[in-house]
Image (cartoon, helix red, strand yellow):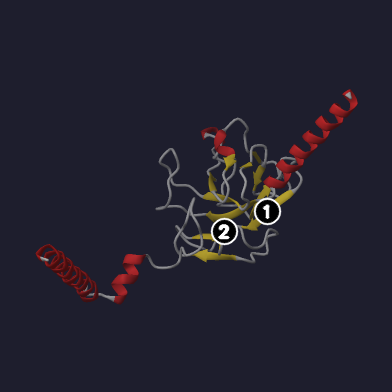
Amino acid sequence: MKHFKLFLTVVGLALCLTAGAQSQSAMRLNEYLVVNTDDFQDDFGQQSAWIELFNSSYGTVDIAGCFLSDDPADLKKYAIPGGDLQTKIKPRQHVIFWADNKPERGTFHVSFDLANAKEIIFTKGDGKTIIDRIPVRHDLGENVSFGRTEDGIGSTDGTSEGWTVLSLTSPSTNNKHVDKAAKPDRMKEIDPYGWVLALTAMSVVFLALILLYFIFKAIGNANTR
């Protein structure tokens, strides 16, 4: 009986470790910005290059112990620390790492920058298994990011399949539809002088008054009878 309990314990631990490894594999490099002069700011109010990771799974993933690097010869360049609840990434959510070469500033500040980086590499906790990698482009200009067309979808080997230049950055939010005009902008294009909006509003009010008229008339007739 004791041996059976020990066997179940070992199997349970193995399953837990396997599940953890599989869940880390669900993380994806999702977007990055090299030149940040007027974009997202970090918790110190600074504007730096940043890297976005995305949890493509439907379970929470703890990325503590994983590694980020800009050097294939040194996959363990930045070890994501443990003991920080924010390293547990919820399903289908994003997390930003600041590539400012200032790891002393906290968990999400890596020990390299993107100004001279050739690629970004995300590695499992074993320090050997590469989960995702992407070449770094230096021709994008200021405040222009490079990201997946759709979150988590596309190449994980640096071929750039499924990646595109984003005219609007989308740190910590979905990449899809980021290039589409906002609703107010689209409405302005359709109705530059506001006539359609005005006529629509007047029509709604007019129809509401007609409806109220018939309702009150019906109530009055019923009371009269």
Where is residue 77 drawn, in percent x and y?
67, 41
Residue contact between numbered discs 2 and 1, judged by CB atoms under 8 Å: no
Where is residue 168 drawn, in percent x and y?
44, 61
Q: What residue lies at 54% left-to-right and 49% top-to-bottom?
A: 94
- List the single residue furthest toward the left: 224
Q: Quadrant of the N terminus?
A: top right
Taking depth in this image into account, of 13 and 178 the one nearest to the observer is 13
Tag 1: amino acid: Asp
Residue highlighted by disc 1: 132
Badge 2 crowding class, 10 Å Cα cut-off, few under 14, some 14 to 19, many 20 or more, is many
CA–CA distance in space, label 2 to label 1: 14 Å
Tag 2: amino acid: Asp
Q: What residue lies at 35% left-to-right and 66% top-to-bottom?
A: 183
Taking depth in this image into account, of 130 and 37 the one nearest to the observer is 130
Q: Is residue 31 left or right of residue 203?
A: right
For residue 34, the mark is none
Q: Earlier in the sequence, mark 2 or mark 1?
A: 1
Camera-side mark, 2 or 1: 2
Where is residue 33 drawn, in percent x and y?
51, 55
Q: Is residue 125 left or right of residue 97?
A: right
Badge 1 crowding class, 10 Å Cα cut-off, few under 14, some 14 to 19, many 20 or more, is many
Q: Give the SS element for disc 2.
A: loop
Taking depth in this image into account, of 143 and 224 the one nearest to the observer is 224
Taking depth in this image into account, of 8 and 185 the one nearest to the observer is 8
Where is residue 93 drawn, in percent x and y?
54, 49
Q: Quadrant of the C terminus?
A: bottom left
Q: Give the SS element for disc 1.
A: strand
- List the single residue furthest toward the front: 225
- List the single residue furthest toward the top: 2
Residue highlighted by disc 2: 151
